[in-house]
Amino acid sequence: MTTTQTMTTTRTTIRTLATTVAGVIACMAAAPALAADTVALRASVRVPAGDAVELAEIAELDGAAGRFASLEIARADAGAFEIAVDAVRQKLLAAGADLRAIRLIGEKTVVRPSRAVAPAPSTPAEPIVRVRTAMSLDQGPRTTLLEPARYAGEPTPIGIATGLVANAFGDDLAAVRLEVREDDLAKLAPKAGLRYEIVAKTALSSDRVDLEVVAYDGTRLVSRERIRFEPRIEREVCVARCALRRGDTIDASNSAIETRFVAPSVRERAAEAGACVGSTVAGSIADGAVIAADDIQQPLAVRRNERVMVRREIGMVAIEFEALALEDGSAGDVIAVEQAGKGRRRDARALTAEVVGPGRAVIRETSMN
């Protein structure tokens, strides 16, 4: 090899080494930058119920992602739930984050709300009104619970007012309680020589009833004062003993039947106590909440496109045949069915049948016509 060839080979080798070293240095410099701005979702977290769930609580943040630590992602209202990485991505985009510079790691985080321990309520030494029932009611500060039956027939402002509201819920005054602020109760104290008139300013059967107490001295108007009652009606209800999620089955371990004094709207929406056990939760239910009729659904006894045995009762005659369910249905539901035959036909006439059990339905007719 000549001297010129040797020098050329040497220069080539040096350039190759320099390029390799520069590449290694560039990779080493870029590695921290790639790993610095990351949001790594934790597998699960526990947060206080009712609190906002912030990004820093559900993920490890590195680099520039740290400035979104206090970004609210969700709220821990009731029951465990999942936060998917897509939901985090949308929140970051809405907050102005550049997702080209932030790497998201993980698929989801399971959030489990923790229940705070409530302080024990203090018992007043001398309660103003003694309630006949042993049940406890959540009372706000400076309120009293009245028993309308105690004042029945009294020609006093409190007797007229409590009777007016309680009678809107039926004749059983013992099944009604009226929560009232103490300052409003003071407005019902009679004064000698005055005549009183109680005027309803809202619907008497609502959760909050506003009344006007009008006082007269003869024919002269003395005063007009506004008061508010919050009715509580006695009812047997089914109560959740823990937080329930959609799809859970209600049984004796997670529910209880209690007699409570509840607001009129709660009484109207409450599910029949005996119908709750065995039903499926349609949405989340908070611990201690009264289970409403629209919170639950009966388990499906028949599913769409499932073959069912239909019993057709015509007077004293009954026949059974196999049919195809055209709808989902629980026990007691009336669904459309089509008699099984040589296949589905466009001109096939759908029948309606009542679901009576898993895979079974009945058609009841009163005559042979």
Image (tube, rainbow, N blue to C red):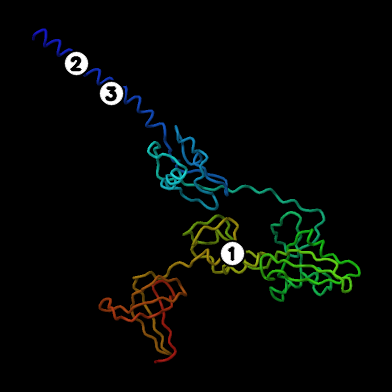
Residue at mark 2: 13
Q: Which mark is residue 23?
A: 3
Dot 2 amino acid type? Thr
Instruction: Please tell me whether mark 1 sits on a helix, a strand or a loop.
Output: strand
Corner quadrant of residue 93: top left
Query: In the rendered view, would you say 273 is above or below 142?
Result: below
Of residues 305 and 37, the one drawn nearer to the viewer in this rendering: 37
Of residues 263 and 15, the one drawn nearer to the viewer in this rendering: 15
Dot 3 amino acid type? Gly
Instruction: Please tell me whether mark 3 sits on a helix, a strand or a loop.
Output: helix
Dot 1 amino acid type? Cys
Q: Position of residue 165 (x, y in %)?
A: 73, 71
Rendered-image quadrant of the N terminus: top left
Query: In the rendered view, would you say 242 is above or below 260?
Result: above
Crowdedness of circle 1 by 10 Å Cα count: few (<14), some, many (20+)? many
Residue at mark 1: 238
